[in-house]
Amino acid sequence: MVHHDVDMFEYLLGGLGTCGACIFTNPLEVVKTRMQLQGELRSRGTYSRHYKNVFHAFYTVGRYDGLIALQKGLVPGLWYQLFMNGPRLGIYQTMVNFGVTKNENGDVSLPKSIVAGAVSGCIGSMFGSPFYLVKTHLQALSDQKIAVGHQHKHAGMLKAFQLILSREGIPGLWRGVSGAMTRVSVGSAAQLSTFSKCKDIVEQSQVFSPGSLLVPVVSSMAGGIVVVCFMTPFDVISTRLYNQGVDANGRGLYYRGVLDCFWKTLTKEGPLGFYKGWTASWFRLAPHTVLSLVFWDQLRELYQSRIANT
């Protein structure tokens, strides 16, 4: 059934669902960020590997920075989820309500879902970009013995915003947004289209009872696998664009933009450079996708049932 309406609660529910997931998966985001910055623009074997794998990275961060450091960047991370995924999931669900993602038979259209996911992801990334910028800075900051990437000496989220505004002005808050738009567009298209299609297939197969929690769980697990495969190279580029230092004119010290970052990473580190932190990405993205979409789906079910009862 197509609902031709715009419900602002869809935006809030989308943000709240991913905020819930962020609390559980933020430690994996810290580990992923550091592994992606490790050996930046250095050929294999010419740098110290402080983080040998995702499990060793957890141990290393806990040993040198303390266990609490595994939740670095949580505050801007939660705001990012609200400001990015609120619009992203809200816009996507609005398109679903208007039947944009359906074909002439009323079934979910994969190509239309991919386009809807990419558009909603692109818009959402613009809203959330300042928070992702600061989150990346805080998560990369570490003890000098295990430091990777540029070290931004921020005391917290508000101090970081104040410093960036004083040095670079408002445009500085959106530095690296081009990488984020590419990253989230690709990831959102893969995640939401896969989730919608899989959920449609699972519901039609009637393997699980109507309203079963296993329906969104199975659908989101499939989405998580696809997201990791397609999104990781763009995730690496986005992390590096956000974390690089800037000169007195606010220009990046390493990269001019997405294409420049892509080319330099390819020539210096080879194709595998785009998959640094792949395991951390999977360990983080798979549960985050599952938790986000399950929380979102369940919040929507609860919201719709309350509307039906009023």
Image (spheres, grey):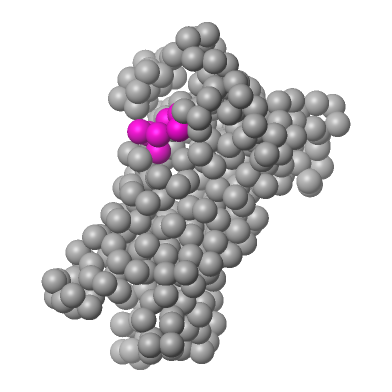
Q: Quadrant of the C terminus?
A: bottom left
Confirm whether residue 244 shows in the render.
Answer: yes
Instruction: Work out whether residue 274 or residue 252 is closer to the camera in this orientation and state it.
Output: 274
- Residue in the image at 54% along x and 42% along y: 234
Q: Quadrant of the N terminus?
A: bottom left
- Residue in the image at 59% along x and 40% along y: 238
Q: Position of residue 153 (x, y in %)?
A: 64, 24
Which quadrant of the figure has residue 265?
A: top right
Residue 276 within the magenta-colored segment of the rendering: yes
Q: Position of residue 257 (x, y in %)?
A: 71, 39
Residue 228 within the magenta-colored segment of the rendering: no
Confirm whether residue 13 shows in the render.
Answer: no
Count of labels in the image? 0
- Residue in the image at 34% along x and 69% along y: 197
Please determine whether, in this image, residue 192 is positioned above or below residue 52.
below
Q: Position of residue 177 (x, y in %)?
A: 67, 47
Instruction: Work out whether residue 14 or residue 41 is closer to the camera in this orientation and state it.
Output: 41
In this rendering, position of residue 14 left or right of residue 258: left
Q: Position of residue 212 (x, y in %)?
A: 19, 71
Please determine whether, in this image, residue 137 is positioned above or below residue 119.
above
Q: Main secondary structure of the magenta part?
A: helix
Residue stretch in magenta? 275-281
- Residue in the image at 67% along x and 47% along y: 178
Which quadrant of the figure has residue 138?
A: top right
In this rendering, position of residue 122 left or right of residue 299: right
Please determine whether, in this image, residue 272 is positioned above or below residue 208.
above
